[in-house]
Image: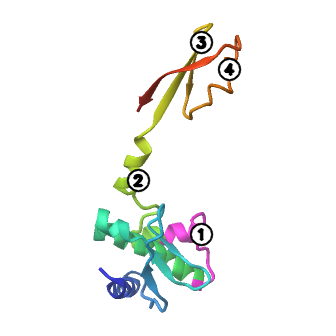
Amino acid sequence: MDQKELQILVEKLSHEYFGKPFKHTALFNLRLRSTGGRYLLGTHNIEINKKYLEQLGEEELIGIIKHELCHYHLHLEGRGYQHKDPEFKFLLKKVGAPRFCNQLPERSVKRTAKKVLIYQCINCKTTYQRKRSINTSRYVCGKCRGKLLKVEEIQL
């Protein structure tokens, strides 16, 4: 799907679900990372994250577009267009749009890879677990001020 097809789809969904025309621009924004789309208050344009179409399909894309169109139409009418507003929540239910989009599969994989570093004091044998590495020549044991030694690194 390209920009022109996206514009046609947004205009079609606006007429079908809201009974109102979409008079501005809908475009793919490749820089969006953590959201499926956004409505721009200043220009009234809608930007869509193309990764959602590629990874989750057209059904997810349609849900995102309907969500952004709720922001669009409510804002232009001067009504409550924010997520917290009752009018926005009501319109979402009315048109069957999701309140939040699903998480991309690639983002959920990145968050699970974590490591734990284990340090041990050479004097009193106290162990310390850390997420970030520490400079063992600068930091010492908190109990006996002994030298710390990196024992192991565990991947979770």
Residue underneath mark 4: 140
Residue at 45% across, 75% down: 29
Mark 4 or 1: in front is 4
Question: Which type of secondary structure does the marked residue at label 4 adopt?
Answer: loop
Residue at 36% across, 66% down: 52
Q: Is residue 74 above or below residue 63?
A: below
Inspect the image, locate mark 3, and give the three-letter code of the amino acid beneath it. Answer: Thr
Q: Where residue 132 sits in the image (x, y, percent)? A: 56, 35
Residue underneath mark 3: 126
Residue underneath mark 2: 107
Disc 2 and disc 1: Cα gap in Å? 26 Å
Q: Where residue 3 sits in the image (x, y, percent)? A: 37, 84
Inspect the image, locate mark 1, and give the three-letter code of the amino acid beneath it. Answer: Gln
The residue range painted magenta reads: 76-91
Quadrant in the rendering for residue 139: top right
Inspect the image, locate mark 4, and give the three-letter code of the amino acid beneath it. Answer: Val
Disc 3 and disc 1: Cα gap in Å? 51 Å
Disc 3 and disc 2: Cα gap in Å? 36 Å
Disc 4 and disc 3: Cα gap in Å? 11 Å
Outermost residue on the top side: it is 124
Asked if labels 3 and 4 touch by Cβ distance under 8 angstroms, the answer is no
State which tag comes first along the sequence, 4 or 1: 1
Residue underneath mark 1: 82
Quadrant in the rendering for residue 63: bottom left
State which tag comes first along the sequence, 3 or 2: 2
Residue at 59% across, 69% down: 82
State which tag comes first along the sequence, 2 or 1: 1
Q: Nearer the viewer, residue 85 or 47?
A: 47
Question: Which type of secondary structure does the marked residue at label 2 adopt?
Answer: helix
